[in-house]
Image (cartoon, coloured by chain):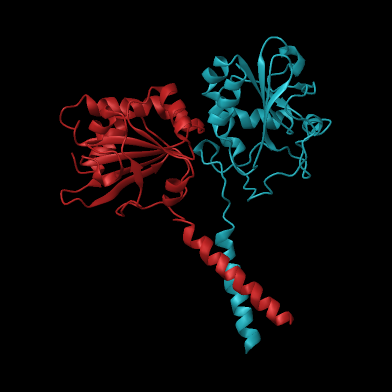
Chain colours: A red, B cyan
Amino acid sequence: MMKKILMYLTVMILLFSAFTFSVLSANKPPEKGERLPVINLPIPKNPDERNYLGLSGSSLFKIPQIKAKAVIVEIFSMYCPYCQKDAPGVNELYRLIENNADIKNKIKLIGIGAGNSSYEVEVFKKTYNVPFPLFPDKDFAIHKACGEVRTPYFMVVKINEDGTHQIVHNQLGNYPGAEPFLELVLKASGLK
Amino acid sequence: MQKKRLANLILIAGILSVFVSVPMAFAISDAYKGNIYQTGTLKPIDSVLKVKVGVQAPNFSLPSVSGEKVSLSQFRGKKNVVLSFVPAAWTPVCSDQWPGYNIAKDIFNQYDAILLGITVDNIPTLFAWTNQMGQLWFPVLSDFWPHGAVAKKYGVLRSSGVSERALFVIDKKGMIRYIDVHDINKRPPLEDLAAALEKLKK
């Protein structure tokens, strides 16, 4: 009898574990040289943001579909003090890129708000006048797929001619300021 | 032989369950580095409310991190008040809640509301913890001694001695207009609080 109960319990625990494990995502961030996890983002409703990313339509897109040679992805949170502190410097990075005709159409910048609702992402966008597209990740799905990184977390994704892509740089916090970071992005993505 | 198989199964289940018990909630900001104590997933709510919407909010007077005492009654007739109880300093989720309110001052201003942050921690702990959040615009109050007395008065003191993650909206007449005793493991979405404040206008 006891054995039967034990067996039953074990099977239940195993089933539960297997289920939970399968929905649990990466337990480490994607490394340099690896591909991004599959991340589906909504195509922005704002036409300026759509143009900026070179996307059309109204459904979902994947980051490597952005029309660029390199994409800088910042995983942030409206609730994170360091993300708040770095926000003006990251805005400056956007302006440095946009004001440089040589790289303007080659490097794009997006932010993903880990655990943030659309409303919360908007509060962040408005507070810091963020000029580049931000996307909510309310249920932490993207955050989990990216190995539950702390924030802010930067990933530089190189998009190749043939449509393939790989991560060429990633870093947790330690944002060095717009100019050194741009330099780093240019080198890592082979644009310089 | 069967016993051995059973033992193996239990071992595998044990190993797998380590992966399963990864906490669902965490302070994800790098600002706290390794200083957040991982509590794991807790019982969502572990207290029984002693107040309800439509009644007068019990008054209290608590010391704040900046030094002065703050009483609920001092806002009577002047400001709407949002009480944000969070369970404890240096724990997940809490550490990622007030910094968000810190950049949402406009929303509180828009509804003529003040925010009072409350935990059961003592002042030195709250001082060190809130320093990691940058300069906060709202008072942070210590419900440390008598331990959790205010949380208890409102019915949000958990059996472990920390408070719930709870929001109370109190209007200028001192009446409770909104209560959200939230799942302790999750952060209440800001839009829910904004909607509650919006309702004060009506």
As rendered, which of B59 and B89 lies closer to the eye? B59
For the point 32% across and 45% down, the residue is A169
For the point 16% across and 52% down, the residue is A162
**Residue A189 quadrant:** top left
**Residue B145 quadrant:** top right
As rendered, which of A166 and B187 lies closer to the eye? B187
As rendered, which of B200 and B166 lies closer to the eye? B200
For the point 42% across and 29% down, the residue is A86
On screen, residue B27 above or below A81:
below
**Residue B172 vs residue A31: left or right?**
right
Residue A63 visible in the current orientation: yes
Which part of the image, by quadrant, shows the C terminus of chain A? top left
For the point 58% across and 33% down, the residue is B97
On screen, residue B167 above or below A28:
above
Q: Position of residue B131 (x, y in %)?
A: 60, 28
Residue B71 visible in the current orientation: no
On screen, residue A62 above or below B6:
above
Q: Position of residue A122 (x, y in %)?
A: 43, 28
Which part of the image, by quadrant, shows the N terminus of chain A? bottom right
As rendered, which of B26 and A58 lies closer to the eye? A58
Q: Residue furthest front?
A: B202
**Residue B19 vs residue B180: left or right?**
left
Q: Position of residue A47 (x, y in %)?
A: 26, 29
Q: Which residue lies furthest to the top in this view?
A: B77
